[in-house]
Image (spheres, rainbow, N blue to C red):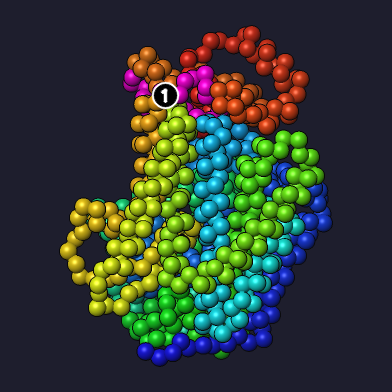
Amino acid sequence: MGDVVQMHFSTPDYVIFALLLVASTCIGLFYALSGGRQRTTQEFLLADRSMSCLPVSLSLLATFQSAVAILGVPSEIYTYGTQYWFLGVSYFLGLLVPAHVFIPVFYRLRLTSAYEYLELRFNKTVRIMGTVTFIFQMVIYMGVVLYAPALALNAVTGFDLWGAVLAMGLVCTLYTTLGGLKAVIWTDVFQTIVMFAGQLAVIIVGAHQAGGMGEVWRKAINGSRIASLDLNPDPTERHTFWTLGVGGVFLMLALYGVNQAQVQRYLSSRTEREAVMSCYVVFPCQQVVLCLGCLMGLVMFARYGEDSPLDKGYVKTNDQMVLYFVMDVFRDLPGLPGLFVACLFSGALSTISSAFNSLATVTMEDLIKPYCPTMTEAKATLLSKGLAFAYGLVCLAMAYTASHMGSVLQAALSIFGMVGGPLLGLFCLGMFFPWANSTGAIVGLVAGLVMAFWIGIGHFVSRMAVPTTLPPIINGTAMPLPSNMTTAVMTTLITLITAKPKPTGVQALYNLSYLWYSAHNSTTVVIVGLIVSLLTGPMKEKDLTPGTVYPVLGNLLFFLPECYREILCCVTPLPQKPKAIDTHPYQMARKESNGVSHPKEEEKTEETEREKDEDEETATPQPSCRLAHTLQETAL
């Protein structure tokens, strides 16, 4: 095995890479000095709820199209074939359900943080637990997202490692702190265009050098890289149609349904319709991203065949193989390597800036404002900017920590992947099951996290303990989802290929495909939460906040007698007046049972109060669970 081969940037490469950082900074400065100049928390954290569909959808796409995915998907296709492409099937439900279930609930409640919902539905303790869990996962992940591409770049090109880390971290911190969410979204749009351009350039030039796409396809077929439909139902199989198409749905729901970074983009939309449309626009974009990654992997295979740069010792890990391929293809084309590196770092920048902004939002809205109700708008905005800046410095510190983790890095990344499923389960418990109470939510979340850590750490330890004579394959980015951080980090676990009998019992649980992690852990939260809620006293109709329960259960249980549906709080309400839905978004109602305040109450006008009184005088009596189901079937 030879030493790692290093190639070097030319002057045009450095110029193009520098232009990316300068352009991103300029966008942040523009929004810091124009419009409302980020003087209110609404403008800084939610872009004044003024964003249109297209920039929001491209930002949704870019938020988790991280450098890990850009490096990893082609490596996955090169090594294992195109079975991974069937992940695109999961995008249908993975984006349809958020568009018609989660967005109507969150948008009509006029939230700023997704975790405000947990307080409205349960209580303040559940909200804080959700917020702390989210902060924990994002802080761990964002340093690694910053460090991983810089490490790959340094290993292949000799580009200064900490120079790249500091340049990305400081630029990202600067435009996020100055420009707020509006700057983050518009830089995401710019960075998405750069990502597409970089990947297309590699595919076009690489395919041309290989003799055209027809030759690339022929070599892929001869090399058994074009996979057929695998209908094996075994959940321990790494990639099958069921793990990708069904397990992937839960991963997409955890990302596009309840993750604060994405929810914040929905809430920044001008109207609920624009927010829903942004989900629809993301769908074809996701398919394009997936196809680009697959094509790049096939072009790599056409160039190297079975003799990969990793096998020859030119690179040390799969993380570096794609970058080596790019430098190899573009060695005689100055500027294009810089374009792809700009593409790579655009993925990192978009992910990190979204993390900064969402972390500042949840910290401000969930951990500070509830305890400082008299804080002025000017102070709250200044503090929000300070929080974004502070998280930027934390990101740089985490990047430094990641550099010293060594083999522990995979374990640290896996911790992040274990959190998305339990949080999804917590939101589903509250949104779909009216009788779930706060005790059930707390116990369910803890049970889900315990199960996630048990399986994840058990998987890691059991793999490390298995002796093998074969070299380990580091799947650091061998199988990440193109737009899903949860999967990207789970796939950094080390997988050792050995000839061993099929695992049974607990060992089979440790061998569960990483794509089923989110489904398994979210289901654990829901089941445990429901059982505990029934044992400790189901939630009563009078304790539920209007608009926090989606009316799906009442429709599914239509065959039960009404008395039983009343016990389960599943009586579908009479339709509200269209005017009430169109002109008056759901307000955060006061919940005296658990002390939830009414942060939006001051926004109600006297005219709204008069209309409410008139409606109450003339309203037809509603079934007992009227408050539990303020969302209408027309949302679907």
Neighbour class for label 1 at 10 Å: few (<14), some, many (≥20)?
many
For the point 71% across and 18% down, the residue is: 609
Q: Judge whether residue 549 is colored magenta.
A: yes
Residue 242 % position (x, y)? 31, 52
Residue 458 % position (x, y)? 32, 58
Task: Pick whichever, 270 or 388, lies toward us.
Answer: 388
For the point 65% across and 72% down, the residue is: 166
For the point 57% across and 68% down, the residue is: 399
Task: Pick whichever, 279 or 187, lies toward us.
Answer: 187
Residue 339 % position (x, y)? 61, 76
Task: State how many labels appear.
Answer: 1
Instruction: Answer with the quarter of the image where residue 441 lies.
Output: top left
Instruction: Answer with the quarter of the image where residue 472 lies.
Output: bottom left
Q: Is residue 89 left or right of residue 170?
A: left
Q: Is residue 374 above or below residue 88?
A: above
Task: Pick whichever, 366 or 245, lies toward us.
Answer: 366
Task: Pick whichever, 125 or 234, lies toward us.
Answer: 125
Residue 214 % position (x, y)? 39, 76
The furthest residue to the top: 617
Pointer 1 residue: 538
Q: What main secondary structure does the magenta stretch of the protein show?
A: loop
Q: Judge whether residue 182 is colored magenta.
A: no
The residue range painted magenta reads 537-560
The furthest residue to the bottom: 2
Amino acid, disc 1: Pro
Task: Tell me the quadrant of the picture where the N terminus can be found.
Answer: bottom left
